[in-house]
Amino acid sequence: MISVGKTKQYANVLDKLLSRGRQEVSLSAFAFLFSEVVQYNQTQVDNIADLERRLEDAGYAVGARVLELLCHREKGNRRETQLLGILSFIHSTVWKVLFGKVADSLEKGTEHEDEYMISEKELLVNRFISVPKDMGAFNCGAFVAGIVRGVLDNAGFPAVVTAHFVPIEGQQRPRTTILIKFAEELLNSKGIYN
């Protein structure tokens, strides 16, 4: 085929550039698929802790792939080597790609030097889930905690990542906080204490 000008015709979807194409997913489609993931995993476990662990494992796989894709697209195959750099990358770039906006806040823990928190007023995965009273402590944010853990582990910053509800006075729904706890050995070996 002869092309005129700079318009390039692709014979195959695999030939298209990774940075092109529609980057949004319908919110209703995501809500439906995510609720199906939760329901399926709920039938496979006996308690809330196992359900959250399974959601975290699913999120971990997503996080590993998101890191690869974003490092290729945004950073020219370069990865962050500094702790604050990778946390900022998750707080801004990863969050914006996954949820359409930057996370509400990124904070360092006041009680422990090795803890950081990413807080979100209304986390997307918790927005459309109604939790039965017998599952009162269940937090779908475990899926997002898994994504964060997947990004961190694959970037060389292993951490324990958990999701917690934090009640806010005057609001019906609590804020979701993703707590990131790095091993002290990691922080000392990379000379990260600032």
Image: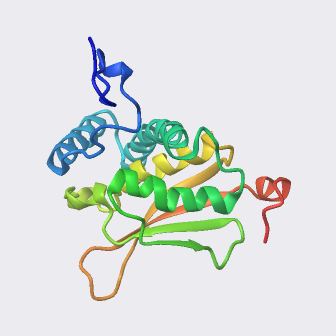
In-front residue for pair 56/189? 189
On the picture, is 147 further left or further right than 25?
Answer: right
**Identity of the residue drawn at 29% across and 29% down:** 7
Q: Position of residue 122 (x, y in %)?
A: 30, 68
Q: Position of residue 90 (x, y in %)?
A: 52, 56
In the depicted structure, whether residue 45 falls above or below residue 13? below
Res 19 quadrant in image: top left
Res 179 quadrant in image: bottom right
In-front residue for pair 81/75? 75
On the picture, is 138 further left or further right than 81?
Answer: left
In this figure, which colouring scheme has been used for the structure? rainbow
Q: Residue furthest top?
A: 1
**Identity of the residue drawn at 36% across and 63% down:** 101
**Identity of the residue drawn at 39% across and 57% down:** 96
**Identity of the residue drawn at 19% across and 51% down:** 27
In the depicted structure, whether residue 104 falls above or below residue 36? below
On the picture, is 52 further left or further right than 162?
Answer: left
Q: Residue furthest bottom?
A: 170
Q: Position of residue 147 (x, y in %)?
A: 47, 47
* The C terminus, quarter of image: bottom right
Res 191 quadrant in image: bottom right
In-front residue for pair 117/70? 70
